[in-house]
Image: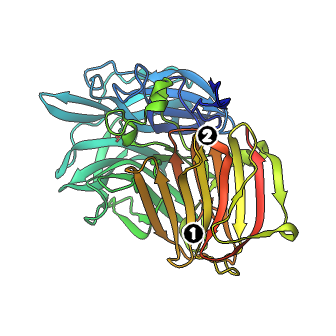
Amino acid sequence: MVDSENSITTDLRPRLHFTAPENWINDPNGLIYYGGVYHLFYQHNPKATHWGPMHWGHATTTDGLHFIHQPIALAPSQAYDADTEGGCFSGTAVEDAGLLKVVYTGSTYQDGHLRQVQCLATSADGVHFDKYDRNPVLEGQPPGCTEHFRDPKVWRHEDAWYMLLGTQIDDQGAVVLYKSAHLTDWVYIGIAAQSDGSQGSMWECPDFFSMDGKDVLMFSPIGLPDRQTTYLIGHLDYTSGAFTAEITGQVDYGLDFYAPQTLEDSAGRRVVVAWMNGWDWMPWFRGYGPVQAQGWCGCMSLPRVLTLGADKHLRFAPVETLRANRKPVLTVDPAMTRTLVPNELCSVPAPTMGTFEVVVSYAIGQGDAQEVGLRLSLADSADPVLIFAFSTTLQALQLLRVHSETDRVLRTIPYVPTDVHLTFRLVIDVSTVELFVDDGVVTMSCVLPGVVNRHAVDLYSVGGRVTVASLEVYDLA
Ligand code: FRU
């Protein structure tokens, strides 16, 4: 799609971030390496560009960047999962005796009440699924939990299957743990974790894995500003069900990152993918019109590899295949570095295709700048729509998204750099932006209602000078 007057592309669809062939998507579901490929299932309304009866869309990939669309895996069809306001909700895929099995939530309204039950479906070829004829495999929630009871995360531990479900207890988010021998007979163990009163009114899409001797629990709280998808690092007691948290962190600090789910890749690494949008992309909520007008809505984040940092928090790095895919456009080595004077804008030369990576290091330990950062604007305007900054005065990272004079969002995240250099790695894919700060200590993901202008990624400093210690630009298209 090209706007002939300005000869700029107006097609908002990212190239490396997964999008459905058409229409609405939300959460990633059932991420798994099975049969020699990675499977991405996803919440999908195949009939409209907004949320509706939920299906499981399906795609496969070998590199996390290029996808092959597969037939829809699950469609609402039974009394327990067919409803115009419900459907086949989020869940997990596991391999069991060579078969691919998915556990998902059937969501319906019956007699005016929300009914969320857990269901099983099986596939021998990884593409076609049969729903278990004795579904649901779990019906009715533990005492104290409301009817919000969904998004099974299932995994194998020792000689049994375990399942976490997102729910609500006393108006607070919670996750509860179950155990089963065959995926069909679930026994309640106990409450794994519960909000302390400040962590949201319901917890959606739990995820769970172990890493370096620790257990990690992730969830997406409802009712917090700015979608603060959370992780806890600690220990799960499989007998009582209780998760003891030692560390609490946020998976991403951007404005478009929700319902993250993980898988173990073929090399044993833990990889996370999230829905890189949010509920405000529903047309009647905020209505980011341009995308829907192009017949689709929603994309997934790039897959990110998780590791544990020295500070015992999670680190996030884009999958390695991204590096293999990139072609250098510009490298400014340290001998040629330059100093930005206050309020000067230094434009980054970007490739034409609008899918590129910028890695900039600021020598924050040396200059006297009060703020350093990057500004991005859209193809049709020079005004910045997105600013990523580090304020030396506040010792904080800042994200400012300006869609219009009345639609401005500012986020401030306390941040103390541990190095004299502060590095921003930015992956820009047409209308999506993912920022990785200092090797993924902090990440911020945002989707813009336009195409990022290739002439308008600017480096800047405020209140003093800063030296750009290095700058690299890569073409990813
Ligand atoms: C999270 C969520 C899940 C639910 C699904 C429905 O975004 O609300 O809790 O299973 O979306 O599409």
SS state under label 2: loop
Figure quarter occupied by ligand 1: top left
The residue carrying pointer 1 sits among few (fewer than 14), some (14 to 19) or many (20 or more) residues within 10 Å by Cα, namely many
Given residues 426 and 209, the one toward you in this image is 426
Give the vertical position of 212 relative to 428 (above or below): below
Q: Position of residue 152 (x, y in %)?
A: 38, 42
In-image side of 372 versus 45 (left or right): right
Q: Is residue 49 shown to the viewer in this render?
A: yes
Given residues 120 and 14, the one toward you in this image is 14
Tag of residue 379: 2
User: Which quarter of the rendering shows the C terminus?
Assistant: top right
The residue carrying pointer 2 sits among few (fewer than 14), some (14 to 19) or many (20 or more) residues within 10 Å by Cα, namely some
Q: Earlier in the sequence, mark 1 or mark 2?
A: 2
Query: Which residue type does callout 1 highlight?
Result: Phe
SS state under label 1: strand
User: Which quarter of the rendering shows the N terminus?
Assistant: top right
> What is the residue that sits farthest to the front in this orientation?
5
Tag of residue 390: 1
